[in-house]
Image (tube, helix red, strand yellow):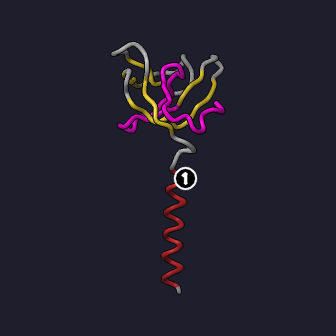
Amino acid sequence: MKLTHRVFSAISISFISLMAAAPVFAASAYLVGQPGSRINVRSSPSTSASSPHYGIVGDRVQVIDATYSDDGYHWYYVEFPSGARGWIRGDLVDVQDPIGLDDF
């Protein structure tokens, strides 16, 4: 009985830890614009925020979050396959699976 309880506890803790690390939603998307163009990946959802890195039109990303900003733009918080993350203006992201994003 004690062994079963310990195994169950370990599995429960592992599951809860994984769920805490998972985004609320994730949608497949890719970057759009003029072919070959660089797209700024910003540190916060604003055109005045720093742009520590960039993506290239056609890059695949996962949308993790979305918001509207004071600058009037819709923004997506994305993750690249490399693990890099940042904010990209909404008109530069084509969301393939918008489940959960309609509220933004």
SS label for mark 1 = helix
Which image quadrant for residue 73? top right
Q: Is residue 31 above or below residue 8?
A: above
Name the residue rendered at 66%, 33% in the picture: 103
Side of 70 where 43 appears, left or right: left
Which image quadrant: the C terminus? top right
Q: Is residue 14 above or below residue 80?
A: below
View extreme (top): residue: 34
Which image quadrant for residue 68? top right
Q: Position of residue 102 (x, y in %)?
A: 63, 32
**Given the image, on which type of amino acid does mark 1 rest?**
Ala
Which image quadrant for residue 31? top left
Side of 20 where 41 appears, left or right: left
Name the residue rendered at 43%, 33% in the picture: 61
Location of mark 1 (residue): 20
Is residue 49 in the magenta section?
Answer: no
How many marks are shown on the rendered structure?
1
Name the residue rendered at 40%, 34% in the picture: 80
Q: Which residues are magenta?
A: 77-104
Q: Position of residue 39 (x, y in %)?
A: 42, 19
Is residue 87 in the magenta section?
Answer: yes
Crowd rating for badge 1 (residues with CA inside 10 Å; few <14, some 14–19, many 20+): few
View extreme (left): residue: 36
Q: Position of residue 27 (x, y in %)?
A: 50, 37
Name the residue rendered at 59%, 23% in the picture: 74
Q: Position of residue 60 (x, y in %)?
A: 39, 31
Q: Is residue 102 above or below residue 10?
A: above
